[in-house]
Amino acid sequence: MKVQPGRQGGRIRLDKMISIAILVSLGAVLLHRLQYYEEYTEKTVTELTITNMRTGLNLRKAEMMLASAQGGAMGVLGDNPMVWLPAPTPNYSGEFAGHAPDAAGEGIWYFDRSARELAYRPNLARHFVPGPDGHTEVRVRVERRRWEPAKAEAEGPVRNPAPWEGVALVLARPYRWF
């Protein structure tokens, strides 16, 4: 029995084409998953930076209490939270009077002096759902917080009945990322 050379060569080419098609499909799936994880990493780094700023705010409040500074913790209202970090993040673009220009790029932090808010403009925002204002930015600001004894009594016994004020780093705009 003799094998015809044309038939065997066609079968090998078909096997190679199927193998290449499978590899291309697997590569496309892998690329899609890598993009997903890259965006998820960006979200995690953003949230970790905000957490570090909250820690910096708490340290600043403790310093002010220990030094018995005039005005107490209220002295940090309107401050740029980036200054509480040991060093600004590498993607910090600085302070602007309003929104940062589009030329500043994506994946950047900037301080909006007019709103007194620190903003992060995501680089990857496929899974970012902005709040009602429609802006694709994460914004935080320092706000005054007042502790009211009447509200705290519902939670349990109150040790210090006098109201007091403090500050906290809070989200300025709601958003959902993933």
Image: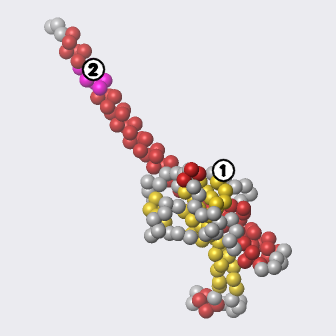
Instruction: Please tell me which residue lies in front, 166 or 17.
Output: 166
Nearer the observer: mark 2 or 1; the answer is 1
Locate residue 158, reporting x and y percent: 66, 90
Going by the numbered disc 1, the residue's amino acid type is Pro
Distance CA(mark 2)–CA(mark 1): 51 Å
| Magenta residues, dominant SS class | helix
Q: Is residue 40 above or below residue 138?
A: above
| Residue at 72 percent of width and 72 percent of height | 76
Mark 1, other Cα within 10 Å: few <14 / some 14–19 / many ≥20 = few
Q: Look at mark 2 in the image and give the residue it sits on.
A: 13
| Residue at 23 percent of width and 18 percent of height | 10
Mark 2, other Cα within 10 Å: few <14 / some 14–19 / many ≥20 = few
Q: Is residue 13 magenta?
A: yes
Q: Is residue 108 visible?
A: yes
Going by the numbered disc 2, the residue's amino acid type is Arg
Quadrant location, the C terminus: bottom left
Instruction: Please tell me which residue lies in front, 173 or 41.
Output: 173
Q: Which residues are magenta?
A: 11-17
Q: Secondary structure at mark 1?
A: loop
Q: Please give left or right for residue 81 compared with residue 133 in the image.
A: right
| Residue at 46 percent of width and 44 percent of height | 34
Q: Look at mark 1 in the image and give the residue it sits on.
A: 90
